[in-house]
Image (spheres, rainbow, N blue to C red):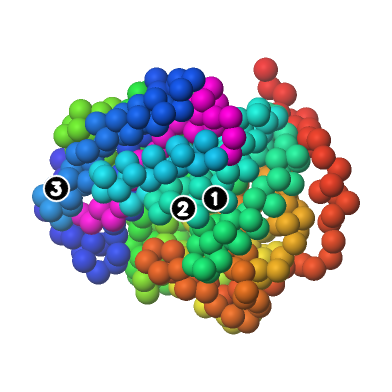
Amino acid sequence: MINIFEVAETNEMIEKENLDVRTITLGISLLDCIDADLKLVNEKIYQKIYEAAKELVATGEYISAEYGIPVVNKRISVTPIALVGGAACKSPEDFVSIARTLDKAAHEVGVNFIGGYSALVSKGMTAADEMLIRSIPKALSVTERVCSSVNLGSTKTGINMDAVKLMGEVILQTAQATADQDSLGCAKLVVFCNAPDDNPFMAGAFHGVTEADKVINVGVSGPGVVKTALEKVRGENFETLCETIKKTAFKVTRVGQLVAKEASRMMNVPFGIVDLSLAPTPAVGDSVAEILCEMGLEYAGAPGTTAALALLNDQVKKGGVMASSYVGGLSGAFIPVSEDQGMIDAVTAGALTLEKLEAMTCVCSVGLDMIAIPGDTKATAISGIIADEMAIGMVNQKTTAVRLIPVIGKGVGETVEFGGLLGYAPIMPVNSFSCDAFIGRGGRIPAPIHSFKN
């Protein structure tokens, strides 16, 4: 039973500490929309999404009003479109028509984003996979709410370096295609190693082929709640620090479990998972970097940052798994630069570099996220950064990701404003030494020896 003290405590977290349910994401399988006729595919996709999701926004708003819990985003994830459109699409432009259909459906049902304009190419690319990947710049420039992701590697299969090379070029092309919006298209494009099938967070959400026809996944967030809790144990030892984070994560995840179960009941859709990630926003007091500072660091990026982040990530997971029957997605601490005021401050102060962020990704929830870089960065340099991050994920058997934004026409020392949850970011320098010959080799980096566990 939840007692009156816990109710009052939760109200305090919502009103003063930025606790919210970041997203209710409805996963929808589009496998039954596959057809050789492109027009029919688009019609089936629109109808399936509309029928499945027409009550999603109203459900989220009702739960928010009924329980007093902010539900910030309502989103949809669908089966990777490279699979759905493979039989009908004969060119990248054909895939763009599906992106337009996804965008139209998202607008019609009122969701913030729709994810799943995706391809899974960790071992190799089909013709459909390659066409979808090449269509991404156009697709993200002509749509508003579509998000795209590509899985380039895994611990079991290694890293598809042909796809890594191609994605460096595609990211730069996407930046150029949306240059009039400060290359905003790249904020809706992410590449993965070990991408999960049940991630509710954009831009990486897609509905995995192992999932049910429809499923409700919820992502919670509470960096401000954790920071406030740590303020009360300032100067205490690590045991006390860990216990405090663990107990706080438990409380935050219980809120997500409540919302997930209620949304599942109201929509008559199975409950999937709660993703118990600490996802920051640009709002003051809602920052993962500020948690690290509360632990005793002058800025995120100072010596000790990776250890502090590892501790945070582990305790969040330990506390969260006790509060929900099903935990999944990414689950941990996000470290996006543009979406976290503390990260922005650290970059501005010179405490946080791209190389230090890469080290932090060894222990964080995802990877290099929402990082603005100069618009004249070479495609091979972007591919090199991606390859480094994929290697971290592959060897450490964890999910890693890259969401870089080469801002066309801007350089180091300037800032870019994305607005809303995407925030703003200082342009970060990129190592200028060449990796052209390395990226140009092609082929596949094999899986590590410890992947053989059959």
Q: The N terminus is located in which quarter?
A: top left
Give me the residue at 59% from left, 56% from top: 174
59 or 5, nearer to the observer:
59
Q: Left or right of 210: which side holds 248?
A: left
The disc, 1 or 3, on the residue closer to the chain's N-terminal end is 3
Give me the residue at 37% from left, 66% from top: 420
Marks 2 and 1 sit apart, C-alpha to C-alpha, by 6 Å
Q: Position of residue 100 (x, y in %)?
A: 42, 43
Residue receiving disc 3 = 62
Marks 1 and 3 sit apart, C-alpha to C-alpha, by 36 Å
Q: Residues within 10 Å of mark 1 (few under 14, many from 20)?
A: some
240 or 4, nearer to the observer:
4
Q: Amino acid at mark 3?
A: Tyr
The disc, 3 or 2, on the residue closer to the chain's N-terminal end is 3
Q: What kind of element bears circle 2?
A: helix
Residue receiving disc 2 = 142
Give me the residue at 30% from left, 48% from top: 107
Q: What kind of element bears circle 3?
A: helix
Q: Left or right of 80: which side holds 42?
A: left
Q: Left or right of 106: which side holds 447?
A: right
Q: Which disc is residue 17 wearing?
A: none
In the image, farthest residue toward the top: 454
Residue 218 vertical placement versus 417 (above, below): above
Residue 289 visible? The answer is no
Q: Which disc is residue 138 wearing?
A: 1
Nearer mark to the viewer, of 3 and 2: 2
Q: Which residues are magenta?
A: 69-92
Magenta stretch encompasses residue 84: yes
* Res 42 quadrant in image: top left
Magenta stretch encompasses residue 286: no
267 or 88, nearer to the observer:
88
